[in-house]
Image (cartoon, rainbow, N blue to C red):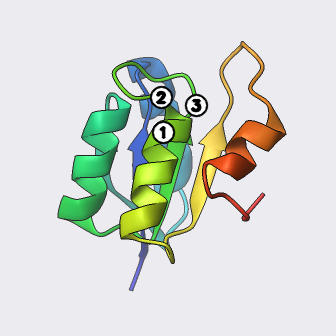
């Protein structure tokens, strides 16, 4: 059974790149895409992925706030972040409930 992965990024080109890279691996399946943090929270609940990839700089709700919400409702879900060009602090990620750095 493939590992189901959700990609959350507001940049369509980045989502396409991640999809191509991930789907090249036979044991990985992209189960959904989200365009902002609110969408990511909804898609995690809907799709039940095994892993979520979050862009930290998404609109409406950034990746840190989305991670906080996702971790509260689904603490066992592994989260992986993509940092945008601006710098986010490691401590801010930890405050979001992330101990999976």
Q: Any mark on residue 56, and which? A: 3
- Circle 2 residue: 62
Q: Residues within 10 Å of mark 3 (few under 14, many from 20)?
A: many
Q: In this view, does 99 lie to the left or right of 38?
A: right
Q: Earlier in the sequence, mark 3 or mark 1?
A: 3
Q: What element carries label 2?
A: loop
Image coords of residue 76 (percent x, y): 51, 77
Q: Pick the quarter of the image with the N terminus.
A: bottom left
Mark 1, residue position: 65
Check contact, mark 1 vs mark 2: CB within 8 A: yes
Q: Which is more foreground, mark 3 or mark 1?
A: 1
Furthest residue toward left? 46
Circles 3 and 2, Cβ within 8 Å, touching? The answer is: yes
Q: In this view, does 13 lie above or below 68?
A: above
94 vs 33, left or right, is right
Mark earlier in primary sequence (3, 2): 3
| The disc label shown at residue 36, or none | none
Q: Where is residue 3 in the image (x, y as percent from the top left)?
A: 45, 74
């Amino acid at each position: 059974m493939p590992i189901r992965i959700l990609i959350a990024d507001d940049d369509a080109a980045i989502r396409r790149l991640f999809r191509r890279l991930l789907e090249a691996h036979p044991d990985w399946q992209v189960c959904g895409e989200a365009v902002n943090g609110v969408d990511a929270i909804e898609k995690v609940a809907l799709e039940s992925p095994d892993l979520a990839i979050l862009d930290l700089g998404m609109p409406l709700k950034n990746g840190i706030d989305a991670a906080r919400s996702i971790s509260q409702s689904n603490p066992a879900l592994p989260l992986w972040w993509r940092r945008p060009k601006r710098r986010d602090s490691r401590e801010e990620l930890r405050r979001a409930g992330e101990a999976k750095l």
